[in-house]
Image: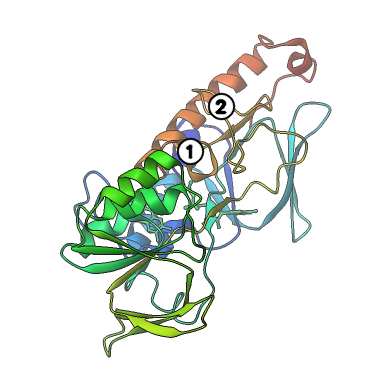
Amino acid sequence: MTAALYCGRAMLNTIVLERGISGGELLNTEVIEDYPGFEHILGHELAVKFESHAKKFGAKFVQDTVVTLKKLPDTTFEAVTDSGNLYRAPTAIVTSGGTPIKLNVPGETEYAGKGVSYCAVCDGAFFRGHRIAVIGGGDAAVEEADFLTRYAEKVYLVHRRDELRASKILQKRLFENPKIELIWNTVVERVEADAQGLVNSLRLRNVDTHAESTLTVTGMFVFVGFRPNTGIIEGHVKHDAMGYLETDMNMETSIKGLFAAGDVRVQLTRQVTTAAGDGTTAAIAAEKYLAARRSGNLEPEIAASGGYAV
Ligand SMILES: Cc1cc2nc3c(=O)[nH]c(=O)nc-3n(C[C@H](O)[C@H](O)[C@H](O)COP(=O)(O)OP(=O)(O)OC[C@H]3O[C@@H](n4cnc5c(N)ncnc54)[C@H](O)[C@@H]3O)c2cc1C
């Protein structure tokens, strides 16, 4: 939505193709306390502000799910949606985000934002002095368990195997942290809550003995993977081992004229601020790309297709 705001403000004809209600992960976030200028704002309220701000500068929002996005031989981009609509533009910015992989256990979705979280940086501060559980065994789980001990009194790391996949250096830090206790060979069976609907315990099962137990915690942070939504892009585009899109400093992908911003791209952290910053850069870079295209000041491949207004 930030990219749309900047494109609209640059007087480009801008369409946002959104499969659902605008807001993405903001809609799964109860409270945002780390977006500058807003000490405390509900995720969906910030989403509404982003959308109306982008619309104010002329961006059009269309509810449609993109199925494929490809570069045509004339170097324009074509997005096809599941309702059969076809959109063509000389440049496109992919901001399709990603999806945290869920455990798919009872209570997980129901208590999301009420003790269940997928983001330590975002929600850690709400668990000051609490006893919480982190689920997973890879780099993200181990790193975030360590991070969460800044706030939590005690962090249980629940892992379904008897060894961690995380790098050795992260494991060393984890084992040296007195606030962390490992629970091996164990999976979560269900998330339980009190009468107010706030998480108060996890029902666990040992995968070897099948013995069940109750872990009293007020939070469950799930780090069992994050899947970037990049399946729509046709043709090869550079990505890392996890599937995140690689970009240069202008947010341009390995496909000339195709930009990416936000959670979908390779980067250190994934926050609303970083997504907004990426969106700004991508929009300004896309505008420059279009200007160069119009002036014919591009490589022969692009110049051959003539100038466009988006
Ligand atoms: C539980 C949780 C809590 C969080 N809390 C915070 C916080 O407190 N502070 C903070 O800064 N960050 C927080 N984050 C992170 C933050 O929400 C993300 O970094 C940010 O939303 C990324 O924005 P984005 O636009 O890149 O992607 P997203 O928010 O994921 O948006 C992607 C959008 O693309 C749409 N889309 C995907 N595929 C298609 C398609 N094929 N066709 C059409 N539309 C499509 C989706 O519907 C979605 O609206 C949190 C994340 C989670 C999961």
Q: CA distance from mark 1 to mark 2?
A: 10 Å
Closer to the chain start, of discs 1 and 2, is 1
At horizontal 54% and vertical 23% (from top left) the residue drawn is: 248
Picture coordinates of residue 148, whole percent (x, y) = 27, 55
Q: Residue furthest left?
A: 129
At horizontal 28% and vertical 75% (from top left) the residue drawn is: 217
Q: Does residue 52 show up?
A: no
Image quarter (top left, top right, bottom left or bottom right) of the C terminus? top right
Q: Amino acid at mark 2?
A: Ala
Q: Which residue is mark 2?
A: 286
Please name whichever residue, 290 or 180, is drawn nearer the observer in this view of the structure.
180
On screen, residue 221 above or below 4: below
Q: Which residue is mark 1?
A: 3
Q: Is residue 97 left or right of residue 222?
A: right
Q: Amino acid at mark 1?
A: Ala
Please name whichever residue, 265 or 220, is drawn nearer the observer in this view of the structure.
220
Q: Residues within 10 Å of mark 2 (few under 14, many from 20)?
A: many
Picture coordinates of residue 243, whole percent (x, y) = 62, 42
Q: Is residue 303 left or right of residue 249?
A: right
Q: Is residue 215 left or right of residue 14?
A: left
Secondary structure under badge 1?
helix
Secondary structure under badge 2?
helix
- Circles 1 and 2: CB distance less than 8 Å? yes
Q: Residues within 10 Å of mark 1 (few under 14, many from 20)?
A: many
Q: Does residue 7 show up?
A: yes
On screen, residue 101 above or below 138: below
Q: Residue furthest bottom?
A: 195
Number of numbered discs on residues: 2
At horizontal 46% and vertical 84% (from top left) the residue drawn is: 211
